[in-house]
Amino acid sequence: DWTMAAFRQEAVAAIRHQVGDGRVLGGLSGGVDSAVAAVLIHEAIGERLTCVFVDHGLLRQGEAEEVVRLFRDHYNIPLHHVEAEELFLNALESVDDPETKRKTIGRLFIETFEAEAKKIAEDGRGAPQFLAQGTLYPDVIESVSFSGGPSVTIKSHHNVGGLPERMNMRLVEPLRELFKDEVRALGRELGLPEAFVGRHPFPGPGLAIRCPGVVTREKLAILRKADAVYLDEIRKAGLYDEIWQAFAALLPVRSVGVMGDGRTYDYVIALRAVTSSDGMTADFYPFDMGFLGRAATRIINEVKGVNRVVYDVTSKPPGTIEWE
Ligand code: XMP
């Protein structure tokens, strides 16, 4: 009789066995997988886990603060919060190609993570020999089937795939046998807050790929606000858990509008929501028009710089979930 409580016990024992009296370095992304892996490893080896959270300045509203509050303050997990917004946004200043964005972000992420790991290795407690990763079973399968499959890369998703080899560390991957819904169940078992465990997946390159074209600080600020209003409406309508992913994208185009007795010339926000079981295929979510109207009105009223909202009714295929 397989239960999450039993899995938790076995996983903790396996981590202790693998790590011995060694030290583990964990990366936190703000997502569910890396968080569950970290809490589980912390339960197994306590203070011998140190986490690094590289904040690339492309997270959603309030997200970075939430990660720090949860891990450092609630769980007391040693956490290095690297605020690298300037570095990333400066490097993205003239980049508009989606794959170049991913490569730029992936490269800077690895460099930033390595630099922080070096500091941790020199903190007098001995260099960590292990690197924790929140790899899930579908990731394992995908990398196997892709290696022998056609050489068409639609998006280079595994942005930080080269990290373990480069750092010459052994991997600790306690979630390798689990599917996403099982990771969520394990997160609940470990006492992670429901709002955190139930979160929609969020891509490594963050808001950069929800801002087609060149990413600027101004666009990011607008996008964050619009996205927060949209998600607030989805939560209020009780629809969050029915949806695989929902987010706003800021289109690189301005349109003419009218506000009071004046003309406006502002950005267009595209709303996206899809159902899916694994992200490989997806259907657009059939909101009712009343919901879409409310979300659009709130976004235009509350977010300066936006005067038009559209809803994306493309499924995958032929679209992808993200816009880039
Ligand atoms: P697409 O847009 O390819 O997305 O339909 C499928 C799933 O993958 C996520 N995604 C990414 N995740 N790095 C990531 O870590 C990426 O570069 C990336 N691109 C897309 C996307 O959010 C969806 O869940």
Image (tube, rainbow, N blue to C red):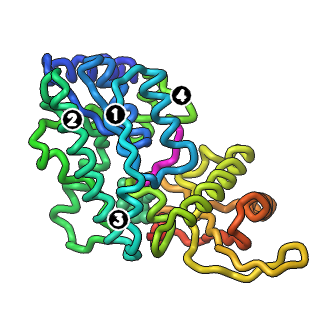
What residue is shown at x 52% (from left), y 35% (from top)? 66
Within 10 Å of disc 4 (Cα), the crowding (few <14, some 14-19, many 20+) is: few
CB of mark 2 near ligand 1 (< 8 Å): no
**Disc ID at residue 193:** 4
User: Foreground residue, 215 or 246?
Assistant: 215
Sequence-first tag of 1 and 2:
1
Magenta region includes residue 75: no
Q: Quadrant of the N terminus?
A: top left
Q: Which residues are the magenta region?
A: 198-203
Q: Quadrant of ligand 1?
A: bottom left
Amino acid on which the number 3 mark rests in the picture: Ala
Numbered disc 2: secondary structure: helix
Amino acid on which the number 2 mark rests in the picture: Lys
Numbered disc 3: secondary structure: helix
**Disc ID at residue 119:** 2
The answer to whether marks 3 and 2 mark residues whose Cβ atoms lie closer than 8 Å is no
Q: Above or below — where is 298 with respect to 238?
A: below
Q: In terms of image quadrants, where is residue 183?
A: top left
Disc 3 to disc 4, C-alpha distance:
35 Å
Report which residue position mark 3 lands on. 91
- For residue 233, side relative to residue 7 (left or right): right
Q: Is residue 318 visible?
A: no
Disc 1 to disc 2, C-alpha distance:
10 Å
Within 10 Å of disc 2 (Cα), the crowding (few <14, some 14-19, many 20+) is: few
The answer to whether marks 1 and 3 mark residues whose Cβ atoms lie closer than 8 Å is no
Numbered disc 1: secondary structure: strand
Sequence-first tag of 3 and 2:
3
